[in-house]
Image (cartoon, coloured by chain):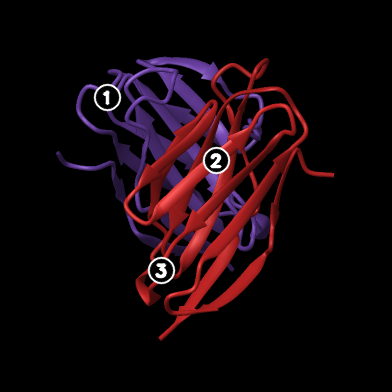
Amino acid sequence: KNEVEQSPQNLTAQEGEFITINCSYSVGISALHWLQQHPGGGIVSLFMLSSGKKKHGRLIATINIQEKHSSLHITASHPRDSAVYICAVRGETSGSRLTFGEGTQLTVNP
Amino acid sequence: EAGVAQSPRYKIIEKRQSVAFWCNPISGHATLYWYQQILGQGPKLLIQFQNNGVVDDSQLPKDRFSAERLKGVDSTLKIQPAKLEDSAVYLCASSQDRTFYGYTFGSGTRLTVV
């Protein structure tokens, strides 16, 4: 079992839909990242969370430390949101190493 | 602000050949990371530098992989000799410090070993 599990692996939505991607982890963490990877391979850091909730534009990220769970929400989704979304955690005892989930491939159709 | 620069973008080599990748982090970023991302998987850390010192290389296959960051700025990752299973995207990332402040990835080098 991976330390970081994401669901779903693949997600197809229609433009305008509200999207949720989930991340569960099995270790104590000091921080959790949500990353976006486009087909060209470039990765962009969307959020870094250690508690609560963060919002940036149409993106919202939440984390529940007790339940070891985080969600990434996209409101009013758009085809340009199509990408792979990756959850990564920094373990309490792993120094600054990040452990990555396998990603969620999101496709938003017009 | 310029991003993390990597080169080349693509490389195709035969097995048993050697290859080198280059990364120039964001100016002022003390921490540099090399990741290997095999198709369909999340990135895996190969090595982490803090300035020109190695912080974590526990997942680096040291029999064939090496990396250096001699002046604490740009870095090279080398594979010698390459194997078929080394086919992957090699990503470089940098951050201002170990807390990941300003954490930024490069676009990666896609390596195909045939």
* Left or right: B66 as drawn, with respect to A7: left
Q: Please state, as top left, top right, bottom left or bottom right, where the N terminus of chain A lies in the image.
A: top right
Q: Secondary structure at mark 3?
A: loop
Decide: few, some or many residues near mark 1? Use Cα within 10 Å; few <14, some 14-19, many ≥20. Answer: many
Decide: few, some or many residues near mark 2? Use Cα within 10 Å; few <14, some 14-19, many ≥20. Answer: many
What is the C-alpha distance between the residues marked 2 and 3? Answer: 18 Å
Question: Which circle, 1 or 3, is nearer the viewer?
Answer: 3
Residue drawn at x 75%, y 27% is A27
Chain where mark 2 sits? A
The reply to whether dot 1 and dot 3 touch (C-beta < 8 Å) is: no
Q: Secondary structure at mark 1?
A: loop
The residue that mark 1 highlights is B73
Count how many numbered circles sit on residues in the image: 3
Residue A89: % across, % down: 60, 33
Q: In the rendering, what colour is chain B?
A: purple
Residue B86: % across, % down: 61, 53
Q: In the rendering, what colour is chain A?
A: red
Residue A97 picture quarter: top right
Tag 1: amino acid: Val
Does label 3 lie on the same chain as label 2?
yes
Chain where mark 1 sits? B
Q: Secondary structure at mark 2?
A: strand
Q: Is residue B15 visible?
A: no
The residue that mark 3 highlights is A76
What is the C-alpha distance between the residues marked 2 and 1? Answer: 35 Å
Of the numbered discs in the image, which one, if any, rests on residue A62? Answer: 2
Residue drawn at x 49%, y 25% is B48
Of A79 and B62, which appears nearest the observer? A79
* Left or right: A29 as drawn, with respect to A61: right
Tag 3: amino acid: Ala
Residue A12 picture quarter: bottom right
Of B77 and B49, which appears nearest the observer? B49
